[in-house]
Amino acid sequence: MSKNNEANRKKNKKLIDQKKRKIQNAEAERKARLKQIREDFKAREANNTL
């Protein structure tokens, strides 16, 4: 029975780690996208002032 608990714990930990990694990747992509949007906006504003 303890083996089964250990197996379940490992499986659940693996699933949780995968979810955490997925969230971190999504957050990094979101930040990169926002940074790109800001840079594009600044470039567009610079072109409009000329």
Image (tube, grey):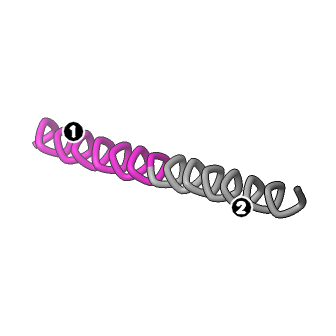
Report the residue at 61% width, 51% height from top: 15
Q: Is residue 10 left or right of residue 28?
A: right
Q: Quadrant of residue 17?
A: bottom right
Q: Amino acid at mark 1?
A: Glu
Q: Amino acid at mark 2?
A: Lys
Report the residue at 27% width, 45% height from top: 42
Q: Nearer the viewer, residue 14 or 49?
A: 14
Q: Residue furthest front?
A: 1
The residue indicated by pointer 2 is: 10
Look at the numbered disc 1 and give the secondary structure of its residue.
Answer: helix
Q: Quadrant of the N terminus?
A: bottom right
Look at the numbered disc 2 and give the secondary structure of its residue.
Answer: helix
The residue indicated by pointer 1 is: 45
Q: Residue furthest right?
A: 2
Q: Nearer the viewer, residue 23 or 3?
A: 3
Q: Do labels 2 and 1 touch, CB within 8 Å?
A: no
Q: How many marks?
A: 2
Q: Nearer the viewer, residue 43 or 27?
A: 27
Q: Which residues are magenta?
A: 26-50
Q: Quadrant of the C terminus?
A: top left
**Magenta span: chief secondary structure:** helix
Q: Quadrant of residue 5?
A: bottom right
